[in-house]
Amino acid sequence: MDKFIYKNKLDITALSAKMSKFSYKKHAHEEYTLGVTLNGVQQYNLEGVSQTSYKNGVMLFNPEQVHDGKAGNFKDGLDYVMLYIKPELFLEALEKKDIVTFSKPIVYEDKLKNDILNLSYSILNNKDITLCNELYLNLMSNFTSKDFSLEYTNETEFIKKAKEIIYYNLDEVLDIDEISKELSISKFQFIRIFKANTGITPYQYFLNCKIVHAKKHLDTTKDLYGTVVEFGFTDLSHLNRHFKRVYGVTAYEYISKS
């Protein structure tokens, strides 16, 4: 049986997941995402490269890295935990101003694994915020080494501008013709260049942004129908369907369990 539990504290979201037949569609998160495979095998494509995390594997995702995900063997199932950490909080703990990225997608490091588990379980079990702060700093101490991080290579100005245009028009219908006109290229060139640089099409990026911001809106308001209207979904079932493809639960289930 597939089960996804989300809890929030310190601007960090913790996820406890059990899944077998469910599979994530291509998506990306705005946060740094850290996870531990507890049981089973987790398989996913990260920016087009196949990855496999076995038991005790620590998965490291940079902000906006496109990936999917599934259990390696649905008969055995898959148990794992994840932490979603906002970039500004991640960089504050590192005392850095510039974005950094993980140099390896999967590592097997006992201290890092245990620090992720300690913080995730504390958030999931609603432990004292002071304890969570201390556990968060313990976790972040792992990333002061160059073994885990490197300087970020900036996106091209073209891709950055394209993302901004899409990002600031989430409540409207995606108009590829209008965007490509603003960027002074054909719509087919735009789609081709965008996918080559991000791993997903402009429409997939548009939907992903809508879902990410719908989740933020739900975290603050718990208002399902307000979220439908705010982000231009056709109806609640439309929001639920796309929400589940990224988070494993419907928007309704998310606010009911959080």
Image (cartoon, rainbow, N blue to C red):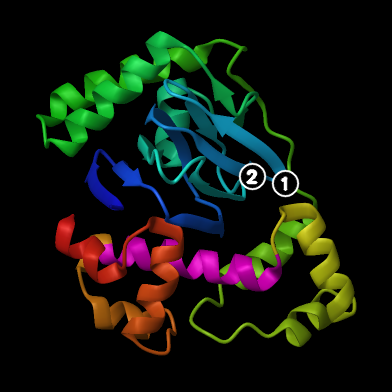
Q: Nearer the viewer, residue 50 or 187?
A: 50
SS assignment for the magenta stretch, majority:
helix
Across and down, in percent, residue 110 comes to 41, 10
User: What mark, if any, has residue 48 been given in the picture?
Assistant: 1
Q: Looking at the picture, how far across and down is residue 185, in whole percent?
A: 90, 76
Q: Label 1 to label 2, Cα distance in Å?
A: 5 Å
As shown in the figure, which amino acid type bears the numbered disc 1? Gly
Secondary structure state at the residue bearing disc 2: strand
Q: Is residue 17 above or below residue 240?
A: above
* 143 or 3, nearer to the observer: 3
Pick the front one: 165 or 247? 247
Element under label 1?
loop
Residue type, mark 2 in image: Asn
Q: Is residue 196 magenta?
A: no
Tell whether 73 sits left or right of 8. right
Mark 1 near mark 2, Cβ–Cβ under 8 Å? yes
Q: Which residue is mark 2?
A: 45
Label drawn at residue 35: none
Q: Is residue 256 left or right of residue 10?
A: left
Does the magenta portion include 203?
A: yes
Q: Quadrant of residue 213?
A: bottom left
Can residue 88 be seen from the camera position used here?
A: yes
